[in-house]
Image: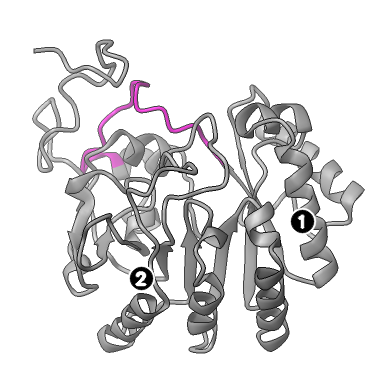
Amino acid sequence: MKDLDETGAASANAGKFRDPERTAKGEARAHVALTRPDTLWFNTGTLCNIECENCYILSSPTNDALVYITEAEVAEYLDQIEARGWPVREIAFTGGEPFMNPEMIGMARAALSRGYEVLILTNAMRPMMRKSMRAGIEELNAAYPGKMTFRISVDHWSEELHDKERGKGAFARTLEGMDWLRDAGVPMAVAGRTVWGESDAEGRAGYARLYAARGYAIDAGDPGATVLFPEMDERAEVPEITTACWDILGKSPNDVMCASSRMVVKRKGAARPAVLACTLLPYAPEFELGETLAEAERDVALNHPHCAKFCVLGGASCSA
């Protein structure tokens, strides 16, 4: 029986990514151990104020497959970090749109108050610009200067291509939010995409011009400050990663995201949150590790196309 993608077409990866221990060719599949837990992610919920053309998590104004996580639930996992002795530096929040969650300010405060750096991924649009949210952001930035960074989704440095992905007027509304963050002195980074046929250098030069024109203190040349993500098309043919690949590619499993991070989500109808191996695979059951950080300490099989294209071969990372 042929493997089919979501369109019903024959998959380019037919027969691959089925067995967590062996590839389609029978070779030993690569696994990654949690060797240096540096970042714990929280998905604040899949609801978003907009619906993008290619959203890997399918966020939208109606998708509540992942429901709002609460400040109390975040605090419980912060307790677990301390109990497990994880050397976590950063607590990161993603969505959906995090500022749709009414407890976003409280969750950020809970992490900052324990000494963690905080990273919030946002489109910087109307949910963030509500009066209560702006007041909370200003309060936290004053109380914990330099400890909280907003990574803004700017899919392309041009209005035309950004709005192609996010809808007409999205670019202008995002810049309005970024202007406010600039004036409030809140540190910013940017997440863009590399799907426009530009070279890395051309893309970064475009972002540099945008930052200069708007007075944004963001380094376009720093991959941690301007993160350019490859397209995550599960229909594209990608190789499976074997244990031999590390030496062949000259890479280490310690460099892959799941060696240094985990993500907590709350599924609709679930009594408790769950811990996932990867921020990119919230709906793949094989990447759910349990309800606790202790359960999430086990190795992760690189058994998905994203593992190869995005992480091992693409070298991308979601953390700062």
Instruction: Kindly identify the amino acid type of the residue bearing the numbered disc 1.
Output: Met
Instruction: Kindly identify the amino acid type of the residue bearing the numbered disc 2.
Output: Pro
Q: CA distance from mark 2 to mark 1?
A: 30 Å
- Left or right, 252 with respect to 207, comes to left
**Residue 157 at least partly seen:** yes
Q: Nearer the viewer, residue 60 or 206?
A: 60
**Image quadrant in which you'd find residue 56:** top left
- The overriding secondary structure of the stretch rendered in magenta is loop
Q: Is residue 1 above or below residue 63?
A: above
Is the C-beta separation of discs 2 and 1 under 8 Å?
no
Residue at (67% x, 74% y) in the render: 137
Residue at (72% x, 69% y) in the render: 131
Give the x, y percent position of residue 164: 66, 26
**Residue 116 at least partly seen:** no
Which numbered dot is residue 37? 2
User: Which residue range is magenta in the image?
Assistant: 229-245
Give the x, y percent position of residue 90: 49, 73
Q: Nearer the viewer, residue 56 or 69?
A: 69
Mark closer to the observer (2, 1): 1
Q: Which residue is mark 1?
A: 178
Residue at (64% x, 25% y) in the render: 196
Q: Quadrant of the N terminus?
A: top left
Mark 2 surroundings: few (<14), some (14-19) or many (≥20) residues within 10 A:
many
